[in-house]
Amino acid sequence: MNAVSVPVTVKMRLGWDGGSVNAPELAKRLEQEGAAGFCVHGRTGRQGYSGRADWQAVGAVVRAVSVPVTANGDIFSMRDLERCLSVVGAAMGMIGRAAMGNPFVFAGEEPDIPRRMEAAKRHFALLVLDKGEKTACLEMRRHLAWHIRGLPYAAHYRREVSSLSTAEDFEKLLRRIARETGGSG
């Protein structure tokens, strides 16, 4: 880390499994080598995204180092973020999966279906501008599943989206989803 002229931060988990939680010790060593900060996910590698994030264990990393630590794991709302920071004592918190298809999470809002579909349309339009229609269509297949999470008939729409291949197809589907799930369309 001292070999580069820019700050290097480290994203890490608590350890490989429950028997090898070594994040505080590893963070100390990495700080000695020049790490400028850490983002610590409160689960082990073996846990993946199952179980609950251990915010207390993230707090142990905060107490072990003198550089900023960002807490991550089980932060799905601004209220969760506030609770996590109060438990962990971290400098910051990171919202991960909760932001997928839900940019409103950062404003603490719970948008209605038409606003969610407008966000999906804008997301798709930006993908088209950035990557072209073909790549945007392929990528939006995955992203749309996040945008429609929790909506009525979401499983049906997820199956349908896998066959879409044009911007026009996506726009029609988004209008239909809004119409069929109680939005205006």
Image: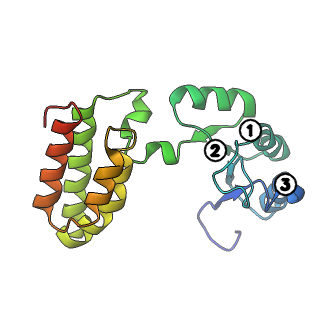
Q: Measured along the vertical axis of the image, is residue 108 above or below residue 125?
A: above
- SS at mark 1 in the image: helix
Residue drawn at (74%, 38%), measured in percent from left and top?
Answer: 55
* Residue depicted at x 37% and y 40%: 103
At 63% from the left and 44% from the top, the residue drawn is 73
Instruction: Identify the residue position indicated by label 2 in the image.
Output: 73
- Whether label 1 touches label 2, CB < 8 Å: yes
Left or right of residue 114, residue 94 in this image: right
Picture coordinates of residue 69, whole percent (x, y): 69, 45
Rendering coords of residue 4 (x, y %): 63, 71
Residue carrying label 1: 55
Q: Which badge, 1 or 2, comes first in the chain's sequence?
A: 1
Residue 138 lies in what quarter of the image? Answer: bottom left
Name the spot of residue 119 as percent of width and height, x first.
Answer: 26, 42
Amino acid type for the residue under numbered disc 2: Gly
Real-space CA distance between mark 2 and mark 3, rounded to the nearest whole angstrom: 16 Å
Quarter of the image containing the C terminus?
top left
- In depth, the one of 36 and 121 nearer the eye is 121
Q: SS at mark 2?
A: loop
Q: Is residue 116 above or below residue 30?
A: above
Residue identifier under label 3: 18
Q: x, y (%) of residue 111? A: 32, 29
Q: Residues within 10 Å of mark 3 (few under 14, many from 20)?
A: few
In primary-sequence order, the first of circles 2 and 3 is 3
